[in-house]
Image (cartoon, helix red, strand yellow):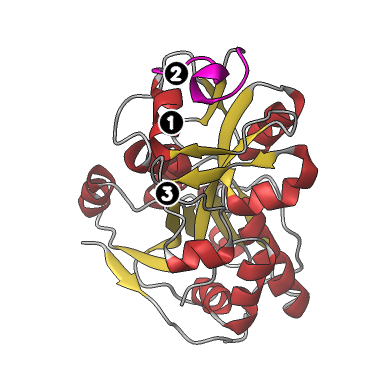
Amino acid sequence: MLRTQNGVSLGIIFTGLVLASVSSCSRPADSRKPADREKYLTIKGSDTMVHLVSTWAEVYMEAHPEAEISVTGGGSGTGIAALLNGTTDICAASREMKQKEEDLAAQKGIEPVEFTVARDGIAVVVNPANPIDALTLEQIRNIYIGTYTRWNQVGGPDEPIVVLSRESSSGTYVFFQEHVLEKKDYRQDALLMPATSAIIQSVSADKWVIGYVGLGYAVEAGEKVKILGVKADDEAAVVMPSEETVDSGQYSIARPLYLYTAGEPQRPVKDFIDFCLGAEGQKIVRETGYVVVQ
C-alpha cells in the first residue's frame, strides 16, 4: 500500500554523516560496507528534478558540512526501480508510482511513502527563430502523434516538424503521453532524448525542432529556446506557463513532483525531506523555476 505524507516540519539536525559534495555519479548503497552506508544520502530519479534536488542538496550541505548527498538522474522509472532494489535512499519522481511498481514493492515487503515536494509546469519549446508563438492542446497532440508533420499545418512555414521526446523511463514522457496525447502513442519518428538538457541543446540548435521540458529548465535556458503559449482550443486565450498560471490551474500541462522513500523515513533521510518541505526548501523551489507546495 502506498502512503502519502505532507506538511512535515522543518529542521532536524543532520547527524552521523561526513564531509560533503553533490555528485553526478551515485555509488550504489549495496556496494558499501554497512558502516559506510550511514555516512551518505543518495537520491536518484527524475531528470526534471535534478536541478531542484541538486540545489536543495547544495544548500543543505552548506548548513550541514558533515553531510554528503549524492544526486543522480536517469528518469523517474529508474529512480523507483533503484528505491525498490535498495540502491538509493530517496527516489525523485515526476509521476506517481504505477500499480505494477506498487505491486513489486508489496512483493518485496516495502511500503513506499510519497511526499509531494513541488509542482511543475511542462513547457513546450521551439527554436527562437521559429515564428510560431502558441499552439492549442489539440495541435500539440497532433504533432506528437504524427497527424501533423509540417509546420504549415499549424500556421507556420512549409518545413518538416522534428519531434523530440524524453525516453519512456522518464516521468515527463509518461505524463505528457497521458495528459497531452490522451494516452495515444508517440509518432514513430520521435527522437527520444536521454535527458532534458539534450532537448534544450537540440531545440537551440535546430530551427524546426519541438520539444517539452520542465518549466524550470526552460526558464534557465533563457534565449536558447522559445517557450510556446498553450491554448485549450481555438477560441481560448493563450496561457504561458509560469508559477502563477500553474498554481491557479490556468496552465493545464502541469503536475506534482514527488520524493519517495521505502517506508517511513528515518534520519538522515527524514531530516533532508523536512528541509525540502520547509520554508527554506520551498524558497528554493520558487527560485529554481518550480511551483511551491501550498
Note whether residue 17 is visible.
yes
Question: Does label 1 or label 2 sit earlier along the sequence?
Answer: 1
| Distance between the alpha carbons at the discs numbered 3 and 1 | 13 Å
Q: Are marks 1 and 2 in contact (CB under 8 Å)?
A: yes
Q: Callout 2: 10 Å neighbours few (<14), some, many (20+)?
A: some
What residue is rendered at 49% in x and 59% in y? 90
Instruction: Give the residue at mark 2.
Output: 148
- Nearer the observer, 83 or 168: 168
* Residue located beneath label 1 in the image: 139
Residue 54, quarter of the rendered image = bottom right
Q: Amino acid at mark 2?
A: Tyr
Q: Amino acid at mark 3?
A: Ala
Magenta: main secondary structure: loop
Identify the residue under disc 3. Answer: 236
Q: Which residues are magenta?
A: 147-158
Q: Is residue 40 above or below residue 224?
A: below
Query: What's the residue type where badge 1 is placed?
Result: Gln
Q: Nearer the viewer, residue 193 or 130?
A: 130
